[in-house]
Image (cartoon, helix red, strand yellow):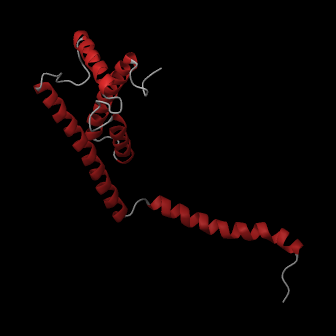
C-alpha cells in the first residue's frame, strides 16, 4: 500500500483537521461550562481558608508588635507620629545606621511578604475581611520602611542607601 499523494494531503488535510478539532472544541467547551466539581470547590474553599489564616496570623503578629511597641513608649498606631517624634526617630535611626549598615529595623514581617500573601488571598477570596486588614497593614509597613529608608539615605552612612 502506498502513502497518499502530496496533492491529496494538501486538499484533504484541512478538512481532516477541521473534522478532528470540532469534537475536541465541543468537549472542551462542555467541560468548561459544567463548572467546578465538588472536589475542586472543596479544595478551593480549603485553599482560601488557609490563605486567609496566613494573612490573619501575620496581621495579628503585627498588631501584637505594635501594642508592645506602644507599651514600651512607642506609638500605638504604627506610622502615625508627630513631627517631633519623627525627627527624634530620624536621629536615632541615623545613629543606628552608623553602627549597623547590614540590618534594617523593619521587623520580622516586611511589606513585601505581607503584600505577597494578600495578593494570593485576593486571587482566591477577594472579599475576605482578612484581606482588608492585611492591606491596611501593608500600607503601615510600607510607610515604616519608607521612613527608615529616608532616614538612612539622609544619614549617608550605609552603602545601600547612599545616593
Give the answer, above or below, for where 122 lies relative to 91: below
Give the answer, above or below, for where 32 lies relative to 63: below
- Closest to the observer: 33 or 161? 161
- Toward which corner of the image does residue 132 lie, by quadrant? top left
Q: Which residue lies at the image location 61% right of the left edge and 69% below the top edge? A: 23
Furthest-top residue in this view: 84
Q: Going by the image, does 76 lie left or right of 94?
A: left
Q: Going by the image, does 52 lie left or right of 35?
A: left
- Toward which corner of the image does residue 73 lie, by quadrant? top left
**In which quadrant of the rendered image does the N terminus lie?**
bottom right
- Toward which corner of the image does residue 14 lie, by quadrant? bottom right
Q: Going by the image, does 60 lie left or right of 38?
A: left
Residue 108: x %, y % from top left: 27, 38
Furthest-bottom residue in this view: 1
- Closest to the observer: 78 or 12? 78
Residue 47: x %, y % from top left: 32, 54
Q: Which residue lies at the image location 27% right of the left edge and 47% below the top edge? A: 54
- Closest to the observer: 108 or 154? 154
Furthest-left residue in this view: 71
Residue 114: x %, y % from top left: 32, 39
How many discs appear?
0
Q: Which residue lies at the image location 28% right of the left edge and 32% below the top edge? A: 137
Give the answer, above or below, for where 34 lies relative to 75: below
Q: Going by the image, does 102 lie left or right of 30?
A: left
Amino acid at each position: 500500500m502506498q502513502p497518499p499523494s502530496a496533492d491529496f494531503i494538501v486538499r484533504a488535510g484541512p478538512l481532516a483537521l477541521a473534522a478532528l478539532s470540532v469534537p475536541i472544541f465541543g468537549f472542551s467547551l462542555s467541560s468548561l461550562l459544567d463548572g467546578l466539581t465538588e472536589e475542586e470547590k472543596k479544595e478551593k474553599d480549603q485553599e482560601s481558608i488557609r490563605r486567609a489564616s496566613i494573612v490573619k496570623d501575620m496581621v495579628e503578629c503585627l498588631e501584637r508588635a505594635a501594642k508592645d511597641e506602644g507599651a514600651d513608649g512607642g506609638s500605638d498606631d504604627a506610622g502615625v507620629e508627630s513631627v517631633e517624634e519623627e525627627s527624634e526617630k530620624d536621629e536615632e535611626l541615623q545613629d543606628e545606621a552608623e553602627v549597623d549598615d547590614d540590618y534594617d529595623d523593619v521587623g520580622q514581617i516586611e511589606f513585601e511578604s505581607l503584600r505577597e500573601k494578600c495578593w494570593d488571598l485576593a486571587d482566591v477570596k477577594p472579599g475576605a475581611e482578612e484581606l482588608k486588614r492585611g492591606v491596611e497593614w501593608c500600607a503601615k509597613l510600607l510607610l515604616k520602611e519608607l521612613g527608615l529608608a529616608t532616614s538612612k539615605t539622609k544619614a549617608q552612612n550605609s552603602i545601600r542607601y547612599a545616593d
